[in-house]
Image (cartoon, rainbow, N blue to C red):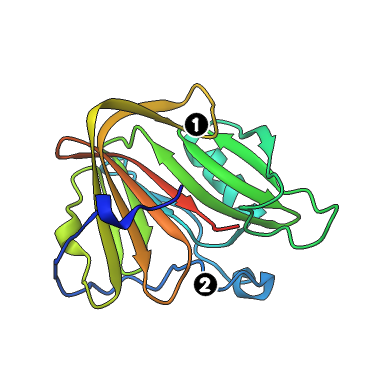
Amino acid sequence: MKILMSSLMILSICLSSCGVPDTSVNSKNIDSIKVENLPKKNQSNNDVLIDFAKVKSQNYINELEKILNIKSIKISEVGDCGGFFSENEGDIENILLLGNMGINAMDNKAIITSVVNIPDNFKIIYNNFIINNNFKMENLPPKKYEIFLEKNKSNQYFSVNGSEEKVLYNIVYIIREKDNDDLIYAYYLDKKLVALNLSSPC
């Protein structure tokens, strides 16, 4: 998705970050995921805590399947560009659907790249933030992030790689960490966050 700077409005926003460990996708080396925090479910309030846009192992996905009591299914493969792991010709990077989440996976590496229809009990860890469906863009500090706003004239649908898992939205925030080329698309229906999508440039 090409960003037309003339149609986007840079938002000036600020809030100090909280103390959740860094979960950026800067490091894609398998060594960085040998010791990792597994997804968690709070038994008292049913909250599910997941890592978004961070390289994990297949074991992380397996544990998430157990927590949600569903199995991931392959819906497609990454094409010529836009993958997170495929570097050589012949590499096969799969795109999986796990409930309301899109996952890119290859060998023992996986990364959650999409979350749609974000339920009330989902707590999504991204960098120094815990994001839920009431998350405000004002929580991201402008010294670390560039944020662009794109308003649609009518409601549109976002889906996980063309699957039936889709959601209606009318506002998109495009987020770029200043030391990272990957883009986060935050889809809102009015004031409610309904989907997140991680995009890697070709």
**As drawn, 22 above or below 101:** below
Residue drawn at (52%, 32%), measured in percent from left and top?
69
Residue drawn at (57%, 73%), measured in percent from left and top?
27
Tell me the mark number nearer the camera, choosing from 2 and 1: 2
Residue drawn at (50%, 49%), measured in percent from left and top?
113
Amino acid type, label 2: Asn
Q: Tell me which label, 2 or 1, sits earlier in the chain.
A: 2
Q: Quadrant of residue 200?
A: bottom right
**As drawn, 39 above or below 161:** below
Q: Where does residue 7 sit, x and y in percent of width and height?
A: 26, 49
Query: Where does the C terminus fall, quadrant-wise?
Result: bottom right
Task: Report the residue marked by disc 2.
Answer: 26
Residue situated furthest front in the rendering = 6
Amino acid type, label 1: Gly
Q: Where does residue 175 sit, x and y in percent of width and height?
A: 33, 59
Checking the image for residue 126, the label placed there is none
**As drawn, 193 above or below 23:** above
Mark 1 crowd level (few <14, some 14–19, many ≥20, 10 Å Cα)? some
Checking the image for residue 99, the label placed there is 1
Mark 2 crowd level (few <14, some 14–19, many ≥20, 10 Å Cα)? few
Residue 180 versus residue 36: which sits nearer the camera? 180
Determine whether, in the image, residue 158 is placed left or right of residue 95.
left
Residue drawn at (18%, 45%), measured in percent from left and top?
134
Q: Quadrant of residue 189?
A: top left
Q: Quadrant of residue 31?
A: bottom right
Q: CA distance from mark 2 to mark 1?
A: 26 Å
